[in-house]
Amino acid sequence: MKQLVAYITCAYPDENFTEDLMLSLKDHGVDFIELGIPFSDPVADGPVIEKANLLSLKNGFKMENLFNISKKISRQIDTFWMGYFNPFYKKGLDICMDKAQDYGIKGFIIPDLPHEESKKYKKVFQNNQVSFIDFVAPTDDEQRIQTIVKNAKEFIYLVAYAGITGSGKDENLTMVINNIRKYSDTKVFLGFGVDEKTAKEKSKNVDGVIVGSAFVKILLDEHLTNIQKIDKISKLASLIKDEIN
């Protein structure tokens, strides 16, 4: 059974909505939640997720919102904190680690902390039994892939193409996937550009997919009530889960 990871923007429009959405997604086939931490300069994200980030910050998002939601929900569905390094650094990495351990957070996904720079923090993650999720890009050669995936835990985040989320490009990833499999038995999840139209094709040869912009687009739809948003996102999650299995 291939797995589905759902990225959602934390605390947008509010904490209660995020909690209800996470639980609904769990009931509609989602295996893991990427709880996205709003940041003012999300360099790896396209306009959809960037807009949700900015709106959440405008609403007054604080790291306490992340902690409150995680405390209530993260033991009910496996949750990863996905965010840029600045919010973690500003709050204090040790504080974030303590909270993550207390709440049962599975790992951190930090797109602007590449493998080389993450090395000095890896011990902190290991000591707190929290995984650091590494990214593999289509441009990585075999030697670099071997280095990145050697000690990978939980899953390896395979970027579908060079660029930003949501742009839906296509690249042949066969060689990259083969190289990952050569050096690691850890699950490989593919992200960037995955939606109900592309999920089936993009899920080939990997263990699951990560969907973000397709869900956040519904999150931003001002014509829908909050209940309608949760219903529509959840139904889309069910559809994608069926498509990849």
Image (cartoon, rainbow, N blue to C red):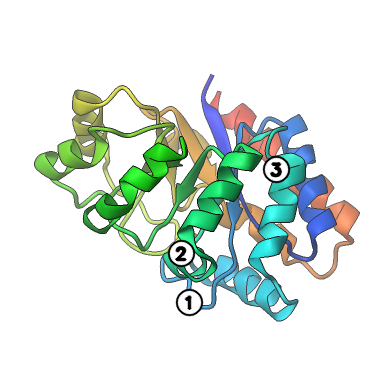
Residue drawn at 54 percent across, 29 percent down: 3
| Residue 236 tag number | 3
Q: Percent x, y for residue 29?
A: 68, 30
Residue sitting nearer the eye, 209 or 74: 74
Callout 2 touching callout 1 (CB < 8 Å): yes
Q: Is residue 152 left or right of residue 5?
A: left
Under circle 2, the secondary element is loop
* Mark sitting earlier along the chain (2/1): 1
Residue bearing mark 1: 41
Please tell me whether residue 105 is drawn above or below residue 68 in the rendered image. above
If the image is split into quadrants, where does the N terminus sit?
A: top right
Q: Is residue 105 above or below residue 120?
A: above
Q: Real-space Cα distance between discs 2 and 1?
A: 9 Å
Tag 3: amino acid:
Leu
Residue situated furthest left in the rendering: 143
Residue at the disc numbered 2: 84
